[in-house]
Amino acid sequence: RAAVAISFGQLRRHVPDVLSVVEILTQGDGLSDSEKCFADDVGSRASALLMAFDAHGSQPVADVISSFIHLRDRIFRDEWEKAASTAIELSNFTRQWHRSRRAALDPYVSVWSDEHEEAESAPLWEATRKCIGELSDRLMKARASRFEGRAGLQVKKLLEDAGISLESLNLTRKRAEIEVQGSDGRSMELAMLSAGQRNAFLLAPLFATADAGPFGFLVLDDPVHSFDEIRVDRLAAVISDLAQSRRVIVLTHDERLKEHLLARSSRCEALAVSRDTVTGEINVEPTDELWRVLISDARSVWKWSPKPSVTGYLTESQIIRGLLRQALDDALRQCVIKYSLKVGASVADTVSKLDSGTTTQSRMALAREIISVDTNNAHPVDLAMQACSHHLRKWNNAAHGQDENKPDLSREIDAGLTACSHLGEFVF
């Protein structure tokens, strides 16, 4: 009995190996249903033997002997030898890879068996491949040529005044190579352009391919970085042209671009996007021309500010009058821009002439010279001067930190609104 107990003790150490083989088989792929059933049966009998060992130790009691005999009847069969071989193969990662590779090749081998006669016509396929490659190269060259022409046109729209043009453009499968021509007709590096000119040049390919995508809209994020006045005007002209056939969404902090776009298109919609600093909620609200916003701000200061504020850096009247002066100046610029577009004059030149005035009075006089209206109609600058001329000195002084008595600032705000309306809403 001692010898039998020792033998059962040795056997007990090998039962987990049987369970490991069963686990590999049940988790593997490619076994038939009968093979899986056989593996499950062996696993159940091995588990029963372990439970008997746990209950009685290695003593040859009836329960241990019976469980051993049941397990022995299964693992001494040919099915178990085959199952063990399969488990060895499944546990060998190299063999698994070879097996998976063979399985992956089976569909191709099957196709080859059915279609090998056609596949043997390799010279024809090679000729076809060569023909397709040549056709692809020809199409790419034709596309590059068309793209170069369209991109060159956009560069001309944005940079013709600076004498900068697109000399050549070479497209490959991975990159685009461009050459820039300066006003002297010589090639130049893109890095030699000013920041604004370079940004305008890089926008040209985008505008050239605006109609190539599947979407009917274009989004531009702050496209006027480092732009001067003439570049802003030329960009607004390009955007307005694009907006004839698609929706163009422009995100910008630059009021000049908003001003030029509103002047160029009656279908331009201005929206103010803001985020609540507490909740993080994004708000989108309609917004007016800048001069209307400034007039509204002046009215809010008049309504809500403390009266008087002796500790503030600026007094209430200085803030309101400064806002009114800015509003009048913005409405004046908008009026000049609209007039320039109407008569086909250079917006950049007329705005530059307007900006040569250093005071509000001188700028109003310059606008009077720039804008010409029919003798049967009142001049918008004259109408604006009638509304606010007696306030201009106070508004200019406030902009330079000087203060005066304020009999009724609400009347000055009304006068500013009337003057700005005559300028900003005038129809040429």
Image: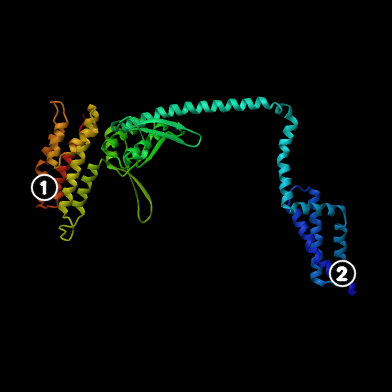
Check residue 394 in the rendering and tell me which mark sits there, or answer none.
1
Rendered view: 143 above or below 85: above
Name the quadrant of the C terminus.
top left
Q: Sequence order check: which comes first, mark 2 or mark 1?
A: 2
Colour scheme: rainbow
Q: Which amino acid does label 1 sit on?
A: Lys
Q: What element carries label 2?
A: helix
The residue tagged 2 is 7
Q: Which image quadrant is residue 13 in?
A: bottom right
Q: Which image quadrant is residue 177 in?
A: top left
Q: Is residue 3 left or right of residue 241?
A: right
Rendered view: 23 above or below 213: below
Mark 2, Cα crowd under 10 Å, few <14 / some 14-19 / many 20+, is: some
Residue lying at 70% horizontally and 41% vertically, measured from the top left: 104
Residue 355 shows in this picture: yes
Residue lying at 47% horizontally and 32% vertically, measured from the top left: 171
Mark 1, Cα crowd under 10 Å, few <14 / some 14-19 / many 20+, is: many
Rendered view: 107 above or below 393: above
